[in-house]
Amino acid sequence: MRAWLLLSAVLCYLAGIAWSRSSLLSEKGLVYGKIGHPVKIYVKLHQNSPVLVCMDSQRASKETVDPTYLWIGPNEKTLTGNNRISITKTGRLILKDFLELLSGLYTCTFSYKTVKAETQEETIVKKRYDFMVFAYQEPDYSYQMAVRFTTKSCVGRYNEQLFRLLKKILNNLISDLSCHIIEPSYKCHVVKIPEHDLTHELFIAFQVNLFTPGWRGACNESDDCEDATNHNILKARDRIEEFFHSQADILYHRFNKTLPAMHFVNHSFHVVRVDSCRPGFGKNEGLHSNCASCCVVCSPGTFSPDIDVTCQICISVRVYGAKSCP
């Protein structure tokens, strides 16, 4: 409460006025293959994949004689069980603690026999199922915000003083969350409001970002920490929103008919979320429509060197999750 009371007090002083995620996932968490169509699976970084079943759902409902299963990984080598790969005797695959480099095409060949009852003649049937598995992360959030304050004039030192004070208050408000204000700017405009005289207003814009020194402390040393960091940026957004709403409340309750010449313009606070992806990840709604809001690992032939939101073309890249173009 001290922050917004302080701002209101200073405004009065400056103005010279006193106080008056797969679409084929079954209910049991199983993902079945689909003949002739690769099934896309999105696995959150450092989490386990759903159960990939080496069979289509129709075949799974029927009796199967002498089934065998052969899984081939993205490196075109036969998969065997280890600390990251679990394969059951019934051909079910789970990928554990998923990493970017585990992304790619997983192919299973399912073989079984059909036996004619009359002759006991056996026929071997083979079916192939393709699963495209991609690592993904939630995007990192930042917020673009805009507010307006009335002012006496577009000329004078008071506007700059207000701007600096506002930056300082907002930064102090969110500093414990490892968040800070970036790209702040303001411009003064003359505004004509219906049935009122011309007024001067400061249009102030800024962005709330998380990446301050020590921000990784919010992750508790976790490799997969976007949930923790996004939680902090959401709290920062809520605090700033509450701050400006309190400015409106103070004007309503503490002033009579005479308002300070410099004051917050009610209902002028606007906020828009801006997403960014970490290096090696990007968004592509066309390619990843089932995970359109996700930051999906960059595929071979693309890379992402910074916290952009898209993967860039680089034909020399041969791996998933590239952060540079060789």
Image: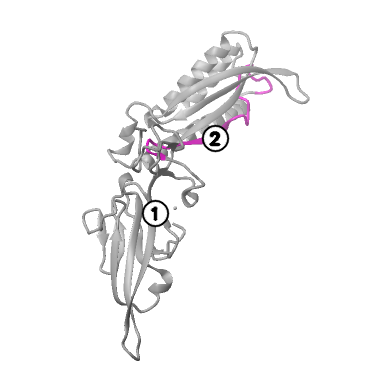
Residue type, mark 1 in image: Met
Give the mark nearer the N terminus: 1 vs 2.
1
Q: Is residue 6 visible?
A: no
Q: Rounded to the nearest whole Å, what is the CA distance between mark 1 and mark 2? A: 33 Å
Q: Which residues are magenta?
A: 256-281
Disc 1 is placed on an element classified as: strand
Figure quadrant of residue 279: top left
For mark 1, does the 10 Å Cα neighbourhood hold few (<14), some (14 to 19), or many (20 or more) residues? some
Reading the image, the residue beneath label 1 is 132
Q: Amino acid at mark 2?
A: Val
Q: Quadrant of residue 153?
A: top right
Magenta segment, prevailing SS (helix, strand or loop): loop
Name the residue located 38 percent from the left edge and 57 percent from the top edge. Answer: 131
Residue farthest toward the top in the current orientation of the protein:
156
Do callouts 1 and 2 mark residues in contact (Cβ within 8 Å)? no
- Point 42% across, 24% down: residue: 172
Which residue of the protein is positioned furthest toward the right in this rendering? 195
Q: Is residue 301 magenta?
A: no
